[in-house]
């Protein structure tokens, strides 16, 4: 599992470098990865509510979103930034073949698409549930 996380972090890092954001690629890729994980958690919570009626998280949603994002950033900092581990990750995947780069980019694009599709499904399930309650 750790290898997959490292690889996705590396792909986000390479994306930042390729768009000319090489100076801030390390923290920006960490924030982007954390944001996608937060969207996944929110989507799953929406699906629980939409299909099962379970209100996750209870209470103030803004507080929970900030908490999820903060928790994701802290965990990702521990995984990728602590002890400058990102340098090891970059060095480890730096010499990929062209086919491996294409395959990796496709995986990241599919992950991003799946994240937003999951978010849409979660919102749709919530709308459907709320329409039935009215």
Image (cartoon, helix red, strand yellow):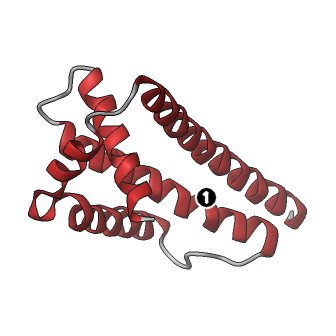
Q: Position of residue 130 (x, y in %)?
A: 80, 61
- Give the tally of numbered discs: 1
The residue indicated by pointer 1 is 43
Q: Quick check: 117 left or right of 125?
A: left
Image quadrant occupied by the C terminus: bottom right
Vertical order, 103 against 71 (above or below): above
Q: Quadrant of residue 94?
A: top left
Q: Quadrant of residue 50?
A: bottom right
Q: Of 108 and 98, which appears nearest the observer?
A: 98
Q: Of 104 and 78, which appears nearest the observer?
A: 104
Q: Quick check: 51 left or right of 117?
A: right
Q: Of 1 and 132, which appears nearest the observer?
A: 1
Residue at 62% across / 44% down in the picture? 114
Residue at 22% across / 20% down in the picture? 20
Q: Secondary structure at mark 1?
A: helix
Vertical order, 44 against 24 (above or below): below
Q: Quick check: 9 left or right of 86?
A: right
Residue at 35% across / 39% down in the picture? 12
Q: Position of residue 85 (x, y in %)?
A: 17, 58
Q: Position of residue 108 (x, y in %)?
A: 49, 39
Residue at 78% across / 57% down in the picture? 125
**Label 1 Cα neighbours within 10 Å, binned few <14 / some 14-19 / many ≥20:** many
Q: Quick check: 66 left or right of 105?
A: left
């Amino acid at each position: 599992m750790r290898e997959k996380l490292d690889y996705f972090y590396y792909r986000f890092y390479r994306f930042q470098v390729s768009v000319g954001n090489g100076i801030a690629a390390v923290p920006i890729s960490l924030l982007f990865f954390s944001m996608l994980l937060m969207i996944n958690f929110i989507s799953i919570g929406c699906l629980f509510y939409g299909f099962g009626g379970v209100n996750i998280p209870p209470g103030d949603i803004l507080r929970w979103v900030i908490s999820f994002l903060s928790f994701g950033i802290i965990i990702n900092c521990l995984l990728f930034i602590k002890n400058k581990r990102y340098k090891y990750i970059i060095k480890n995947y730096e010499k990929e073949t062209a086919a491996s780069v294409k395959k990796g980019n496709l995986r990241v694009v599919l992950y991003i698409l799946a994240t937003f599709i999951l978010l849409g499904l979660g919102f749709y399930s919530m709308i459907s549930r709320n329409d039935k309650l009215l």
